[in-house]
Amino acid sequence: MSKVAQQPKDFFAASKKSNSKIIHATKNASPNFHKSLVRLQQDYIDAWKMVINSAISLEKEYAEKVGFLPKVSDSAIQTIHEMTEMSIQAYLKQNEILSDTVRTTEQAFATFNDSTKSFTSINKEIMELLMSKYGMQLKT
């Protein structure tokens, strides 16, 4: 007879063991998932850079071949630089907001975990009180 069949069946122990296995597998898979996302983001940025630089190079090449080299005012160049800086600042602000959101979420999880522990403790105390009123004893 198998080892599992010989052991008394405990639904709660089996549930806890199953949950532990799922959590363990999820935690082990997470780093690979995150690495994949970072690589995908880097690939996206590299592709985006390639497309933009290729388009600019082709436009410049065609403009030179047809003799069309537009004169751009200093204010237009300044506007391009300002737009670039504003884009970078917007991206940095977006990352700052994301970091703040992550920290806040981490705090929320910590509070949730503390609340769960307190709730479990209170429920246990209520159960013990009820059991004592009916002359039963918890097996812990």
Image (spheres, rainbow, N blue to C red):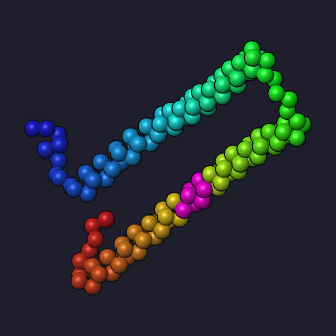
Question: Which SS does the magenta portion mostly show?
Answer: helix
Of 6 and 78, nearer the camera is: 78
Q: Please state the horizontal and vertical placement of residue 117, each as a whole percent of the image.
A: 45, 66
Does the magenta run of residues contain 107? yes
Q: Where is residue 87 in the image (x, y as percent from the top left)?
A: 73, 44
In this view, 9 is above or below 139: above
For residue 13, what is the image quadrant? bottom left
Q: Residue farthest to the left? A: 1
Q: Quadrant of the N terminus?
A: top left
Magenta segment: 101-108
Q: Can residue 35 be seen in this view?
A: no
Residue appearing at x 16%, y 52% in the figure: 8
115 shown above or below 69: below
Position in image of residue 128 (x %, y %): 32, 76
Report the residue at 43% width, 37% height from top.
29
Residue furthest toward the bottom?
Answer: 133
Q: Is residue 96 placed above or below 108 in the rendered structure?
A: above
Can I make out residue 113 in this image? yes
Judged from this view, the residue extending furthest toward the top is: 65
